[in-house]
Image (cartoon, rainbow, N blue to C red):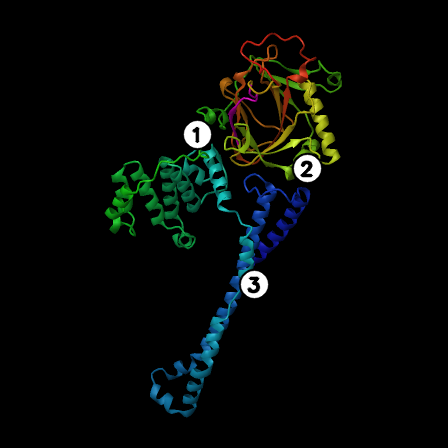
Amino acid sequence: MLLYRLLRSFANILSLYVLLVACQTNNPSKTIDYVTSLKDKLQLLEQNGKLLLNNYEYIEKLQAKVKTLQKLVKHLQQPQLAAKGEEEEFLSNPMNSLSLIRQMHADWTHVEKLMEQPVGQKQMDYIRRMNERKPNQENVEQALVAMHRLASSYELDAADIASGLLDGMQTDAKLSPLECYEMGLLYYNGSLYYGSIEWLETAKELMDKAPSDVYNLLGLTRSDISHLLARCFIALDKLELARKVLLAEPDLSSKTEELLEYFKENKPEEVENDNLIAFHEKTAQLCGSSYKPKPTRLLCSYKTSGKPFLRLAPFQMEQISHDPDIFVFHNVISSIEISILERETEAFMLPARVLDNGKSVLSNIRTVSSVGLPNKNFSRQLNSLITRIRRRISDLSDLNDSYYYLSEVLKYGFGGHYSFHNDFLNSSVFRDDRVATVLLYLNHVPSGGGTMFTQLNLTVQPEPGKAVLWQNLDVETFDFETRNEHASCPVKIGTKFAMAQWIHEREQMFTRPCLKPPKARVYPDKL
């Protein structure tokens, strides 16, 4: 089988590639992350390929058994063919009688044994073992929620997403009726019925164009979609629309009134799924592919002042906002340094956590994997590189950066985002707050992943080696600079790597010695 041989060759190549990636990013304690981890997704793809090969082997075993049975049946049907139309004459021959009696006594017993003999037991055992490593329902929901973030933040239609059209960019990937139905179910369980209706209607349209018997075998029928669609309409008190959906479905039409009564008596309770967050009204505008930054007449030059190092290797500096000041620096690190950072930190990344009432928790407002820098588990080469990068950050910002404070390498998978926030901390708790942030991009993101400042109508797009600097505190009074509220646009295609460095006020004691009294900030009495 040509397809079988091609799959085996592809699986061998993919297995080698996964082995190489795993060797580079081996960390036994790391949890599986099917949304953002390239290594985990590669292993999932490899697993799918192996299951396909295993299935083809199972099919070959079945086909071999079928061929054997066909050969036996062809042999055993000879008396039947010979006797056709002349049964009495055939049976009057003693040799035919003997053959028939012996065949009915013994040969069919062997056929029965052959039919009962298990086929492909090895392949069945393999698929059971592989089931232990497959994604669980939580992994599926994470991927569905990531798709929700794309649909909601970029204001995308379900039909466009299903056809591979993402914010004006046509991709070669598509969703099946199964994925669309799961999206509809996600919205239904979150009481977002209009969103559910959109996805379910898309699922029905795709089902009508697809071989429904395949999806029936995979556990989804057109009646399932219509059933849930009618429930959505009833939840919205749209009785006639629900009736129309049920009457149009052959398997449900005869039970329409009975189902409608049941749905009305058992309306779903209103629930709130914290994962189905609503996005800022400016997200689609500032994160979409149509966004174009307004041309400015602000500063664009080489930064040579400040540290002596800058006279030898000045940074390309661009001011993209004034009052508040935001600066962009280009070619801050090299492609080789970026490669080392990405390769050697990914294995240590874990889902990022946020502070909630003093506790560190996972949150849907920040869906990213991260690792703190520096790290005692890193190689000496990597920690040395991080030291050099942080020294450059200090040079370009004209602020002191202490290694007492961690920086982070961040990785956003598809749909990965960070909701609107300011980087300063809480004045009632912290006397030493974050005076500035430097965000260093490590790669190009094909679509999405920009950093947007809503109050400034400004978005900075990721480029390798590009850094953006903004103030979290007023540099003279250390009051909070709220106008620099920002967010990370959800990643549509690709993965976003970045390094975040927060610079604290305590380290600026001698860098910014002449401070004016704060106007709005109140310091705590005790540290």
Few, some or many C-alpha atoms within 10 Å of disc 2 (few <14, some 14-19, many ≥20)?
some
Which of disc 3 and disc 1 is earlier in sequence? 3
Q: CA distance from mark 1 to mark 3?
A: 49 Å
Q: Secondary structure at mark 2?
A: helix
Q: Secondary structure at mark 3?
A: helix
In the picture, measured across the screen, residue 313 lies left or right of residue 432, that is right
Question: Do the residues bearing badges 2 and 1 touch, measured as CB atoms within 8 Å?
Answer: no
Instruction: Identify which residue, 286 or 164, lies in the foreground.
Output: 286
Return the x and y of residue 67 as percentages of the image width and height.
50, 70
| Quarter occupied by the N terminus | bottom right
Q: Amino acid at mark 3?
A: Lys
In the picture, measured across the screen, residue 392 lies left or right of residue 62, that is right
Q: Which residue is mark 1?
A: 278
The residue shown at (43%, 37%) is 160
Depicted 410 relative to depicted 135: above or below: above
Q: Main secondary structure of the magenta part?
A: loop
Q: Which residue is mark 3?
A: 122
Few, some or many C-alpha atoms within 10 Å of disc 1 (few <14, some 14-19, many ≥20)?
few
Where is residue 409, by image quadrant?
Answer: top right
Depicted 164 relative to depicted 74: above or below: above
Q: Which residue is mark 2?
A: 344
Q: Residue furthest left?
A: 257
Q: Amino acid at mark 1?
A: Ala
Tell whether position 421 is magenta: yes
**Magenta range:** 417-426
Return the x and y of residue 502 as percentages of the image width and height.
63, 23
Return the x and y of residue 408 as percentages of the image width and height.
63, 29
- Residue 525 visible here: yes
Tell whether position 488 is magenta: no
